[in-house]
Amino acid sequence: MANDTVAELMAELAALDDPKARAVNEKHGDDHGVNLGKLRAIAKRLKTQQDLSLELWATGDTAARLLALLICRPKAFSRDQLDTMLREAKRPKVHDWLVNYVVKKGPHTEELRVLWFDDPDPVVASAGWALTVDRVAKQPEGLDLDGLLDVVEKDMKDAPERLQWAMNHCLAQIGIEHPALRARAIEIGERLEVLKDYPTPPGCTSPFAPIWINEMVKRKN
């Protein structure tokens, strides 16, 4: 039904909150216990409802915000709205979904990438780097790739976790997509040793940039 109120949806989300799921999520910095498959099922029922999305976001509740991001209209947000929302998105899953499901699908991606890239808040800056990874892969023209490697080389080792992950992803993406810079990217990764000892499950690719780059290049060939 399309006439759900925020209060009804909040009650529905509260009823779905699973303490075990919450405990797992809290280890990753997320404070909700709603199964994401069930959350997506609610979003499918609601379809796109921009006004309802804004009301859900305004609750500040993590599960409600995730639902808001699934039913919003990405192109309906202004640049300033998205900037404010990102700065409010303190939980990793909300931050990731906002960047990937909304910002990347709207008209303000490049403007926000530039705005966030050098932000003093490392969480905000990590969003700028995440959008830069996308450009490295899909539209590298106009990017100073050597300059990006310079920044990674200088700052990644001591960067806070979320920013470090995003910088590392950018390092790997440059190495994967740009053969002329591959040796430099691998050398930087080997020297900095960021995520070298990260526990990687069997069958998964290590996030350690030299291994990641070589594995993905091998798959492409």
Image: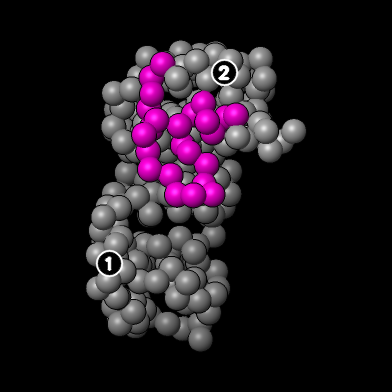
Q: Residue at x 35, y 19 (%)?
A: 155
Residue 111 against residue 156 in the figure, above or below: below
Does 160 sit left or right of 177 as displayed?
left
Count the marks: 2
Residue of label 1: 22
Please report the residue visible at 48 percent of the width from the left and 33 percent of the height from the top: 169
Q: Which mark is residue 123?
A: none
- Residue found 60% across the figure and 34% down from its top: 215
Distance of label 2 from label 1 (alpha carbons): 40 Å
Residue for point 65% across, 22% down: 178
Say whether residue 195 is magenta: yes
Corner quadrant of residue 163: top left
Magenta region, residue range? 191-214
> Which of the marked residues, 2 or 1, is nearer the chain's N terminus?
1
- Which is nearer the eye, 209 or 90? 209
| Residue nearest the observer in this picture, 74 or 184 | 184
Say which mark, if any, is on residue 145.
2
Residue 164 on image: x %, y %:
36, 31
Horizontally, is 107 left or right of 33 in the view?
right
Can residue 116 be seen here? The reply is no
The amino acid beneath tag 2 is Leu
* Residue at the right extreme, as displayed: 221
Q: Position of residue 31 (x, y in %)?
A: 26, 61
Q: Position of residue 29 (x, y in %)?
A: 27, 52
